[in-house]
Amino acid sequence: MESVATTGPDSRTLKRVGIGAAVVALCVVAIGTATRISATNDLRETAADASIPTVAVVTPSIGGEGNALVLPGNVQAYNSAAIYARTNGYVRRWLADIGDHVGAGQPLAILDAPEIDQQLAAANADYQTALANQRLAGSTAKRWQAMLAQDAVSQQETDEKAGDLAARIAVSNAALANVNRLRALQGFTRLSAPFGGIVTSRSAQIGALVVSGNAAAQPLFTVSDIHRMRIYVRVPQGYSASVKPGMGATLTLPEYPGRNFTATLTRSAGAVDAQSGAVLVELQADNPDGALKPGAFAQVKFDVGAGQGNGVTLPGSTILYGNDGPTVAIVDRNGRVRVKPVTIARDEGSTVQLSGGVSPNDRIVDTPPDAIRTGDRVKVQAPAKAAKGAANAR
């Protein structure tokens, strides 16, 4: 009887299949592990890139508006006078109001002063009495002088009559002086403009009592001559040598945007105020249309040149203020930050002018975060024009 042969796979084949499956499994595991390691590395790189802040940088500018010294100024009238009452009385009527143009000597108000009127009448009566006594003493002295020539009276009596005449003359002069004084006081009941100008204030009211010599009283009127204006500016000591009489300046006022007024520096105080550390200077400007108003605020721009420090100007948003004073964050070519102290020569709000600390080639971080420190890595944001060009190229 013949035996039947087994037809299943032999052991070699099974071994080879097992080894191949194991190799495939190892390859799958290796590929999966490599994929996970690569993904982890990519994630780490992405996280590292995300942790580096992107900043915008600016470069300092030299010249241009940085050489213009802009300071606040106070506009005042060329002449201004506060009109007070020089005598006691009541306001009978006022003849000018705020905004009225008045000429020199034009009446502004009229006061009633009955006491002054009565005092003047009494003074006139006293003066007439003194004149009558003077005339009597004069005729008596003349008569005694004639009798002395005839040896009818003594020299002593004649001298007494002459002395009485001199005394009467002195009394008459005193009475006349009193009359003139009261006439002058009576003239003060008519308030007049001391010069031509415009009435800028009025506190006179009909029937109101006004008392002369009252330091707390308001002026009844204020008259200002505005055909030409004075502008007072306090110049910091560091720029006082560059601001000299005769130089020009430009005024700008908030109520006239886009309009410039020309002024000329006329005089300087020549001394530094101990409290403000500035020198007071005066400018003058013509005011033909009355656009400049007394008491107005103006921005005064002087062209002082580039002689102050290094003339480097930066946006105000680049300055960091801390315990160590003002600083800026400078980015080097490797993207590393260096926080450096600076010296501010002038702060104009939107821009600051530095007298030291940076060079024109430095890249300064604009609006730096408060937590930025020396050694931090940053990415510099591409300029707006370059980014737009790259987008168009795509």
Image (cartoon, helix red, strand yellow):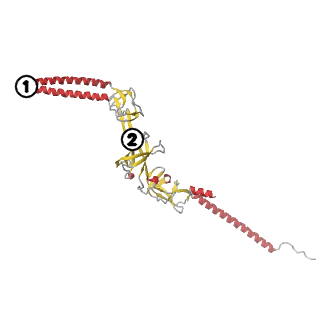
Residue with the mark numbered 2: 228
Report the residue at 13% width, 23% height from top: 140
Report the residue at 70% width, 66% height from top: 31
Where disc 2 sits, the SS reads: strand
Pinpoint residue 84: horizontal percent, then vertical percent.
35, 33
Where disc 1 sits, the SS reads: helix
Pinpoint residue 218: horizontal percent, then vertical percent.
38, 33
Please tell me which residue lies in front, 340 or 141: 141
Question: Quarter-wise, where is residue 20 in the image?
Answer: bottom right
Please tell me which residue lies in front, 319 or 164: 164
- Distance in Å between CA atoms under marks 1 and 2: 73 Å
Mark 1 Cα shell of 10 Å, populated few (<14), some (14-19), many (≥20): few
Residue with the mark numbered 1: 149
Name the quarter where the N terminus is drawn.
bottom right
Q: Residue furthest bottom?
A: 1
* Between discs 1 and 2, the one toward the N terminus: 1
In this rendering, position of residue 9 left or right of residue 74: right
Pinpoint residue 150: horizontal percent, then vertical percent.
6, 24
Q: Residue furthest right?
A: 1
Name the quarter where the C terminus is drawn.
bottom right
Question: Quarter-wise, where is residue 56 in the image?
Answer: bottom right
Please tell me which residue lies in front, 128 or 214: 128
